[in-house]
Amino acid sequence: SIVIEARKRPSKPFGRQAITQHLQSAMVRRSANSAIFLSYSREGLAQEIGDWAEGVSESGYWIATTHPFLIIAIRFLVIQQRLNKLRTFESQLDVTAVEQQIQQIRTALGRIRTIKKSLTEVGKGVSVIKAEADALNIDIQSALKSIEQTLRFVTSESID
């Protein structure tokens, strides 16, 4: 069984140790053998976690993630549980092929993390550029107003 612990606390990001302890307790309370730590947003997870992290506690395997990855996390844990069960029964299944696909998923999740990190950096750059453009626009407006006032003063003096 899988326990899902949902949190909406961006002010206190959870790291690996806190997640492991929290989920270990939740798995024991609910007699589960795997768990998901679901954060409402990326800010609820420590930087070391990113959007996805996997770990193991005494009670079982866990995943920490954000809402967009919830379905993937559930499917991933179900696959892990089935794979572990098949290993114990020495099934005809090619476990190596499945593990390679699991590794592909992990690699893809890592690439998503890299892309999101880059997007965050680009977003910060866009914010700085926008602020600079807005400040320049204000400077231009101020200079134009000053010129117009000066021209009105000169024009009114030359007319007199």
Image: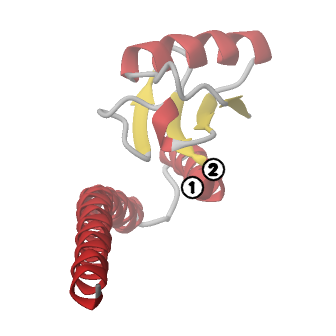
Residue 137's x, y, as percent? 30, 71
Of 135 and 44, nearer the camera is 135
Q: Residue at x 29, y 66 (%)?
A: 142
Characterize the local packing of mark 2: few (<14), some (14-19) or many (20 or more) Cα atoms within 10 angstroms.
some
Report which residue position mark 2 lands on.
Answer: 67
Of 66 and 127, nearer the camera is 127
- Where residue 33 sits, quadrant-wise, is top right
The residue positioned farthest toward the front in the image shown: 160
Quadrant where the N terminus sits is: top right
Residue 7 relative to residue 102: left or right:
right
Seen in the picture, residue 6 relative to 42 is either above or below; the reply is: above
Mark 1 to mark 2 CA distance (whole Å): 5 Å
Report which residue position mark 1 lands on.
Answer: 69
Q: Residue at x 26, y 86 (%)?
A: 155
Residue 9 relative to residue 119: left or right:
right
Q: Secondary structure at mark 2?
A: helix
- Where residue 25 sits, quadrant-wise, is top right
Residue 56 relative to residue 29: left or right:
left
The residue positioned farthest toward the right in the image shown: 30
Residue 51's x, y, as percent? 43, 47
Q: Amino acid at mark 2?
A: His
